[in-house]
Image (spheres, rainbow, N blue to C red):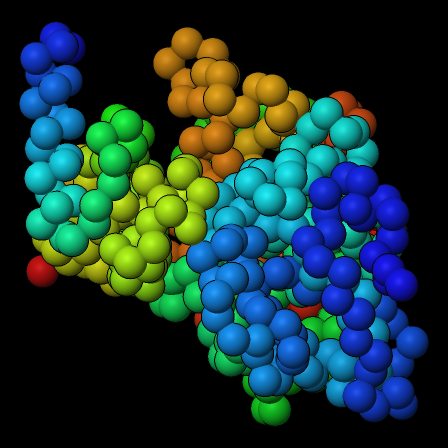
Amino acid sequence: MSQQNRDEELQKIAAMLAEKGIDLPPDAHPDVNAHWRILEAMACSMETYSEIPGASLR
Amino acid sequence: MSHTPQLASDRAWAARDIHRKPTNPDGALAGLSFAAKDLFQIGGEITRAGSAVFDNDSPAKNDAAFVAKARGMGATLNFTTNMDALAYGFITNNPEYGLACNPLDERRICGGSSGGSAASVAAGLVDFALGTDTSGSIRVPAAFCGTYGYKPSAGIFSTEGVQPLSPTFDRPGIFTRDAKLLSRVAHALAQSGTLDSTAAQPNKIGMLAGQFASGLDPAVKDSIRAFSDSLVARSGIEIAGVQAARAATYILVADEAAQIHVGNLRSQPESFDPETRHRLAAASLIKPEWCNAARKIQADFAWRFECLFKDFDILLAPCVNMVAPFAEDIEKPRETGHPPLRASLGMLTQPISLIGAPVVAIPLETSLGFPTAVQLIGRIGSDAMLLNFAKDLGCQI
């Protein structure tokens, strides 16, 4: 990932936190972003459930 | 005068030196000693839950109902136990209380988040200990320390006076060194009418496979197989969607934890330790559609288990896929393509948390000289049957 992409990711995290009213110093944003990426990976993992034969998600 | 054993302080198993005598010295647990995870209210003390976040709160007026019942049954509270901050972790590496080491090898972790409770019992410092299990926080440390652990169905033990992490999944529970005492303590502390001491024995036991048998350390695999071979009517039972179910638990627990702590994240972020603060901050950003998807998986996965419970009274699965790891290895990848150890610790307990099933963790020896544990999983409300069965197995550490 390029430095520019990394910076954009962190800006996005900072904006999302600000929207929630959470004010953390910039040096916290990379760590928050790392945890956010784990949550995104978990969300992706949940998407596989609908591929299971017989899964009822309605 | 300190009532906490020096060993518990030295090895970071104790949180605080809080001693309380029984309120009724003649109860069913008379003469027994216990320790309680640092998140149970103790009358006259601030409920810290291993975090400075609550340090400006008023002291609790009363004991948590679970603690009060233990004291009312004749047991003595000797100290509170170390835990991951806010019960959000599987290591018991607390920024203030320290890294709790495994009673069998100081270089290894004891698991978490109820690690101080499991270690104190395993080391023989108390007769039993109280903990909580949300995603595996009783079962993982029970496996690493070689104790029995009991995560009940909802409603068996009172949650009144327990600092929550995720109210949907939080379950107060118990650690002991033997199954007979586990059953005795559970029956003494259960809310009225919730545990039937005359519960029937299980007819049919099955062994879960698929993801539950994948990536196991060979020593853990051999130990589980040796235990289950003589018990199970059928092994190799596959259930679909285990990884997605684990992810659903992860998302729902994180979302509830963020909802509980978001006020303090806004008003006093500096009072959190950095790791917990950043984890909760990320969780506060969880999208509502993820939670909706997780709840649908929860309903479907529970239905799949209900189908299995038409054929089996108890299902077996490992608690963890390894013996207690070295503390220094926690962040290292296991091998190419495998996630770091830290990420593996709840893989086999989180899917079971999703369905709310009661579990008794039974400790087993391995050829490595360190214990593991098997989950005895029952349908919701079958707790008494699980406890009786564990007791009749007569397993002694």
Q: How many marks?
A: 0
* Residue A50 falls left or right of residue B301: left
A30 above or below B123? Answer: above
B356 above or below B158? Answer: above
* Residue B188 falls left or right of residue B396: left
- At 27% from the left edge and 45% from the top edge, which residue is drawn? B281
- At 86% from the left edge and 60% from the top edge, which residue is drawn? B2
Given residues B205 and B243, the one toward you in this image is: B243
Residue B139 visible somewhere in the drawing = no
Residue B351, image x and y in percent? 40, 49
Residue B249 visible somewhere in the drawing = yes
Residue B211, image x and y in percent? 41, 35
Residue B28, image x and y in percent? 83, 84
Quadrant in which residue B128 is drawn? bottom right
Given residues B76 and B317, the one toward you in this image is: B76
* Residue B337 falls left or right of residue B285: right
Quadrant in which residue B387 is drawn? bottom right
* Residue B293 falls left or right of residue B340: left
Q: In which quarter of the image is the N terminus of chain B?
A: bottom right
B352 above or below B94? Answer: below
Residue B137, image x and y in percent? 55, 51
Given residues B330 and B394, the one toward you in this image is: B330
- At 47% from the left edge and 12% from the top edge, which residue is drawn? B335
- At 14% from the left edge and 18% from the top edge, which residue is drawn? A6
